[in-house]
Amino acid sequence: MPRPEKQLTPDASPRDWFGHELRTWRKKRGPLTHAELSAKVQVSGSLIEKIEKATATCSRDLAERLDEALQTGGVLTRAWGMVFGQTEKARPETESAPPGRAEVPVQIHEGRILGRGSTTPPSGSPASVDRRAFLATSGLAAIAPIDLVHLVTPAAPREIPTQIRPREIRQLKSLADVIHRQDNEYGGGGAVRELARGAIMWGASLLPVPCPEPLRPELLASVARLGIVVGASQFDAYAHNDARVSFRLAAECAEEAGEWHLRAKTYSFMARQEIWVGDPDTGLTHAEKGLVRSDRLSATERAMLHTARARAFGKMRDVANTLRAVGEADAAFEQSDPAQDPPWMAYYDYAQHHGDTAHALFDLAVRADQDPGQAARRFEIAVKGHGNAFARSRAISETKLASLVMAKGDDPRHAVVLGHRALDDVGKLTSCRAAEDLRELARFAGRHRNLPEASDLRERIAATVQA
């Protein structure tokens, strides 16, 4: 009789979670043995077993091959950057995992709006920052809130004011505006990422500074907004652990300030990040949290959160609930009144709404064999409606439209034309999300190997992503 497989502990570390996820999908598809799966992805069966046990690393290329062989919908590839890409230098596939990282104590914060209680972590078992940041919103373990100020503020002393004045609050707001604008136009990498990192460290360092009571809510709200835009930028750059910390900081500040609008915006982004990295269930939970007391939100904000729900259901291939959530998002958006929206919601316009809902319908078309027409029409509206100020959103919608036509349409040459248009935009960005969508387009183009134009497109995609 074959030996029983070792029981895995997915909550022990990001690597253990990845290994458990790989084993789960392997069991779903057959189940396949290690040898059978290894033959499909051209590696040894022992390497597959070691990755599952978290004793070997997985290269990005192997994650992509595993996704394709196991038909996961890209779960492992999206999780790869969070598990392996941000925390270690490139290693060959056969190298073993490094010894455990140093661990630090974690303190507790308490939110205000929902009246959360807090519990102290068991003494003698502190969890590492990496593990807590990874698990805090993943639904894999119940972990107490993080001491976010400690996490994002470096140990070295910095020059900070002795008292908060209106000047510091104006600077926080200005920083958030600049990062938001630069992120949408150029993506979250490069100089934008460096600006965002410094900004959130400075903003967090202001929270313990004495502040006149009348200014305290405005200070908290300003740090919350900064946390949102910085987290969005870090998410786009695949700095997922950093983004989680920034979003959690934003959520804590928004709740303490009693800012329901900022709270909703934070949970919307938290939902989108978890959906992107392959955890739509947790993403759905965040979207539902954002809709708590939806009577206090504007119609545009409700549309934004229902769209996040739709995208979660789309990733789950839940056709009925996806269509229902898209309908709820459309109904809310029809009631939108810009005069009722906070200034930072101006981005969520006609183009943004149609692009966001199109993403949910894209998953149904590609992965649940639904009609692609509705998703295509919405992507077209988004592409036409996004100006240069939202070049990344336009580029992503262009790329997804090209992928949709390449995968489900009857004219791959038209998809090639759309793909080259997308590349014209993506080539100007530093966006990991945009690059990931290009890789998906290349995989769909690979189905048309007898079409020279499709091969040319794949070559240009490879050159663009590498650059």
Image: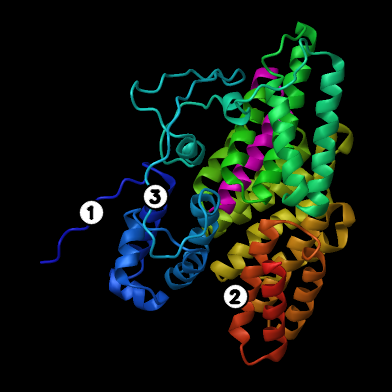
Q: Earlier in the sequence, mark 3 or mark 1?
A: 1
Residue 94, image quadrant:
bottom left
Circle 1: is it few (<14), some (14-19), or many (20+) Cα within 10 Å? few
Q: Main secondary structure of the magenta part?
A: helix
Assess whether mark 1 and mark 3 are in contact (beta carbons under 8 angstroms).
no
Q: Residue at x 22, y 58 (%)?
A: 5
- Residue at the spot of label 2: 443
Q: Amino acid at mark 1?
A: Lys
Residue 142 location (% of width, % of height): 42, 32
Distance from Cα at disc 3 to Cα at disc 2: 32 Å
Assess whether mark 2 and mark 1 are in contact (beta carbons under 8 angstroms).
no
Q: Quadrant of the N terminus?
A: bottom left
Residue 65 falls left or right of residue 95: right
Q: Quadrant of the C terminus?
A: bottom right
Coloration mode: rainbow
- Outermost residue toward the front in this view: 156
The local secondary structure at tag 3 comes to: loop
- Residue at the spot of label 1: 6
- Outermost residue toward the top in this view: 213
Q: Earlier in the sequence, mark 1 or mark 2?
A: 1
Tell me if residue 270 is in the magenta stretch. Answer: yes
Query: From which residue to which does the magenta span run?
Result: 255-277
Q: Amino acid at mark 3?
A: Pro
Residue 225 location (% of width, % of height): 75, 31
Can residue 449 be seen?
yes
Can residue 341 be seen?
no
- Residue at the spot of label 3: 98
Q: Residue at x 49, y 34 (%)?
A: 129
Q: Residue at x 68, y 67 (%)?
A: 465
Distance from Cα at disc 3 to Cα at disc 1: 20 Å
Residue 176 location (% of width, % of height): 80, 34
- Outermost residue toward the left in this view: 1
